Amino acid sequence: MNSSPNLSTKRPSKQGGSKDLSVRAKFERLGLTSPEALILHLPIRYEDETQIQPIASLRAGVSAQVEGVVIRSDVLQKPRRQLTAVLRDETAEINLRWLTFYPSQLNQMQAGKRWRVRGEVRGGMYGYEFVHPRISVPDAPLSVSLTPVYPTTDGLSQPSLRKAIAQALSSANLDDTLPNKLIHQLNLLPFDEAIRLLHAPPADANAQSLMEHEHPAWIRIKFDELLAQQLSLAAAREARQSKRANPFKAIRTSKSLVERLKQTLPFTLTDAQQRVCDEISADLARTFPMYRLLQGDVGSGKTIVAALAALQAIENGAQVALMAPTEILAEQHFLKLSAWCEPLGVRVFWLAGSVSARARREALEAIRSGEAKLIVGTQALIQEGVDFASLGLIIVDEQHRFGVAQRLTLSRKGEADEDVLHSRSEVVPHQLTMSATPIPRTLAMTFYADLEVSSIDQLPPGRTPVITKLIASDRRGELIEHIAQAVAKGQQTYWVCPLVEESETLDLQTAVDTHQELSQALVGMRVGLVHGRLHANEKAQVMQDFRAGLIHVLVATTVIEVGVDVPNASLMVIEHAERFGLAQLHQLRGRVGRGALQSVCVLLYQTPLSMIARQRLRAMYETQDGFEISQRDLDLRGPGELLGARQSGMALLRFADLATDSALVRMAREVAIELRKESPDIVKRHLNRWMRGREDYLRS
Ligand code: ADP
Ligand code: MG
């Protein structure tokens, strides 16, 4: 069980001598190993101990400081042993309560004693109360500045942090890293002024703007942080460009693989596809590694672009690996690429978790020998034991679904293999990542500043926009009748069951139940079921039947979220749509609207809706533009989640917030470009202050 840190009680320390050591370890755990690190450890909030508030003026939820006399106290035995007291000033009374206490506290709370009391006001059963308030002597001078509250770790108290930081403020180097002229020009506070203010804001400072990181002192710090980020990303880009990659020239004769594939396609590329193909093609011909993000809304036709890139590398003798986040998606790529490439004499290899041991051995051997030129798979591709003879291009589809850590493994794998096999260091594969969730500009400029971005901003012709309907779940019956009619007219339907948080079994159960229910309700129609627990070939069979039109209604868990392409499916029902994230909903909806038929996406929701769920559903209803959706997603959730950062250590920004600080991001970007050109010594100084010990994050 989790015990709330606020209510946990201090236990008398048993060890004595090792105290110093353990305190140091705690500072280390927070990364606070130098005065320079300490001064950048900034408060998460402030307490106002600059004034005494009348008890009558208190409100629940605010922290407050009062002074008064104990009028009675009591040790209750029920419902559990606890110490209570009542404190009175000239205006009113408030209750004090301790769930555990020392005898000395009992003594403190004797009636008639006068104290200064500080804490968070809570609405208790018998009126307002302070639970475990801090007690100090009355009538002492009030503090002149707001009291900082720092992020901390178990067992490291605020007073020890405050003391260490106050010391650091007098010993650390607070010189500005930026020249005066620039500070003036940008209308920023000097660094030392900003830092000192944030650690000890004057009593009259605007508490609100401090809280919300909008105070000029915060602006300066956020700018510095963003500048450091821009500078280090630019350095990473330069480092990449100083690496070597094998150049793959575009071969433009009509016999080339690329041209032959284009000729056999049943469609011509859209202008947008042709443009990004040219961008990628030019990158591949360079002697430093491509690192390009291909973004295009669902259905914009990224796969063919990837295939053409792959062929350019292959006809230059290199191997290409294409990875997708789910086996279903990887398999779709495999089928599609096989259909496109095998007629050209390029065999496509398949490597996923579920491949039989023998097939796997053969594939691995072919990859090692270099016979396998095009390999499609899931994460299995980055597992140990896959040795590429000469991996020249890595393509990652729907890359936002992978953690950064995984992407790192793959790009390092390419490097390592090149090292071993060619005993030539620093030759790395080109990398193309594809995403249907466009990265909002602010994010692209920061975390992805090291990426070149190509956008397919046009859908292939003949698509009709999907109609989105929001329907409350009590009308489910009506909906099923409607589906019966649609299916009778030849339309195919997806029915997506929600993810049950943290329970794959429950998840599965819902899908199985729904499948049964729909099978019974839709007499004479074939209802299929696909979910993550099916065996790969069962999954493949179901998908194949659906594609072939043998299955009319496909009940699925979110395994179909990304990339599945069945143009005849024109109706999608998403059950418990309120449980899905915005990006997920957008991906799911993108499964329909791929053919000529008018498509409909029904978001079935269960009331009551939370605020955020309501906003998500509204966004889905109002727009189909992936860029707009991802911007709203960013606004609703913040960048961490969008990037899948939780598991990746990507939380590089401590103070700035990409969702709200885009103006600062732009400013930092411009200044970074300028400084890198004109003032390398300033760059060095600034990075030294901000990026200590964080260099390895910057490579991803
Ligand atoms: P996504 O960008 O979502 O991965 P796909 O690559 O799966 O999209 O393409 C969606 C569908 O559009 C596929 O059936 C594909 O063959 C088709 N397609 C791709 N490009 C074109 C085009 N230029 N004209 C017509 N259809 C296209
Ligand atoms: Mg795709």
Image (cartoon, grey):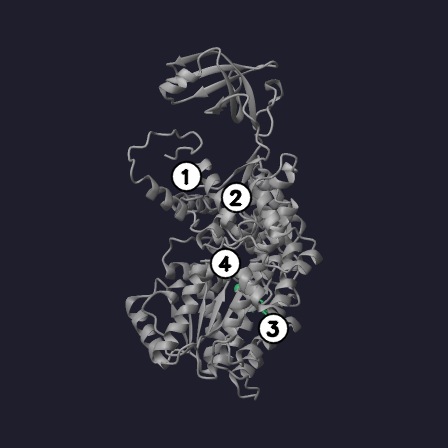
* Residue 301 higher or lower than 642, as above or below: below
Q: In this view, does 80 lie to the left or right of 685?
A: left
Residue 74, image x, y percentages = 42, 12
Residue 235, image x, y percentages = 53, 68
Closer to the camera, 674 or 35? 35
Per the image, the residue denoted by label 2 is: 579
Select label 3 or label 4 by which is in front. 4
Q: Residue 156 carries which label?
A: 1
* Residue 471 higher or lower than 565, as above or below: above
Residue 299, image x, y percentages = 59, 63
Give the amino acid at mark 2: Arg
Q: Earlier in the sequence, mark 3 or mark 4?
A: 3
Q: Earlier in the sequence, mark 1 or mark 4?
A: 1
Q: Earlier in the sequence, mark 2 or mark 4?
A: 2
Secondary element under disc 1, as helix, strand or loop, is loop
- Disc 1 to disc 4: CB gap under 8 Å: no
Q: In this view, does 528 lie to the left or right of 384?
A: right
Q: In this view, does 663 lie to the left or right of 574?
A: right
Query: In 3D space, how far apart are the residues under numbered discs 2 and 3 (Cα atoms)?
Result: 35 Å
Q: Earlier in the sequence, mark 2 or mark 3?
A: 3
Closer to the camera, 361 or 565? 361
- Disc 1 to disc 2: CB gap under 8 Å: no
Per the image, the residue denoted by label 3 is: 276
Q: Say which residue appears at 48% left-offset and 82% top-offset.
A: 344
Secondary element under disc 3, as helix, strand or loop, is helix
Secondary element under disc 2, as helix, strand or loop, is helix
Per the image, the residue denoted by label 4 is: 691
Q: Earlier in the sequence, mark 3 or mark 1?
A: 1
